[in-house]
Image (tube, rainbow, N blue to C red):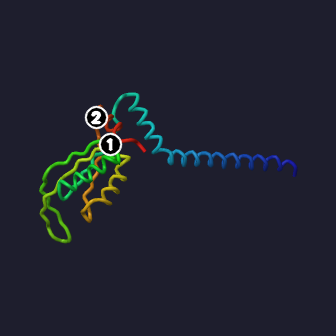
């Protein structure tokens, strides 16, 4: 009977090592998958800093329509004072057609182009919704794929990162 004991012990050790190996592999996969977004972001930052290239999507342009020029200027100044944007262009008088409560509406609006960091867009959208005179303000965000590097660096300097 003693000759069975060492064999049983070896199988138990083999099973333990197999389970430990599977556990390590599974934990490695979970950690890799959970850290992938952060690692990709850091890799992109390192690449852009070493090569001097632009990381697409780091900046955004928002389109905001306002009912009149005074509302656009008030909202734009408030955004600038809160350092949520580097630059705001207020384009005069755009003709707009849209559905509202089941009917086609015609209006004259003022279009704002807001340049900022993508990390600020949600905060900016929430702020605009809280002060905008429209019940459902138009606030659309578009990521910047490429552009003038000196200009984009200026945007970074003008809009502090949280």
Q: Nearer the viewer, residue 33 or 135?
A: 135
Residue at point 24% right, 63% down? 134
Residue under pointer 2: 151
Quarter where residue 67 is shown? bottom left
Residue under pointer 1: 59
Q: Nearer the viewer, residue 59 or 137?
A: 137
Residue at point 47% right, 44% down? 36
Residue furthest bottom in the image: 102
Image quarter of the C terminus: top left
Residue at point 43% right, 33% down? 46
Q: Where's residue 155, x and y in %?
A: 32, 38
Q: Where's residue 142, x and y in %?
A: 28, 48
Q: Nearer the viewer, residue 34 or 113?
A: 113
47 on left or right of 128 = right
Q: Provide the secondary structure element on which disc 2 rests.
A: helix
Q: Residues within 10 Å of mark 2 (few under 14, many from 20)?
A: few
């Amino acid at each position: 009977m003693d000759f069975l004991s060492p064999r049983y012990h070896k199988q138990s050790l083999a099973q333990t090592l197999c389970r430990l190996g599977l556990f390590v592999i599974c934990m490695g996969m979970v950690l890799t998958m959970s850290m992938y977004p952060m690692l990709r972001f850091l890799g992109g930052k390192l690449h852009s800093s070493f090569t001097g290239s632009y990381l697409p999507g780091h900046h955004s342009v928002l389109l905001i329509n306002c009912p009149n020029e005074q509302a656009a200027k008030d909202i734009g100044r408030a955004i600038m004072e809160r350092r949520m944007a580097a630059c705001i262009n207020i384009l005069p008088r755009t003709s707009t057609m849209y559905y509202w409560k089941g009917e086609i509406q015609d209006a004259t609006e003022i279009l704002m182009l807001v340049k900022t960091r993508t990390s600020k867009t949600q905060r900016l959208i929430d702020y605009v919704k809280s002060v905008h005179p429209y019940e459902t303000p138009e606030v659309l965000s578009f990521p910047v794929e490429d552009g003038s590097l000196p200009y984009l660096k200026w945007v970074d300097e003008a809009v502090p990162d949280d």
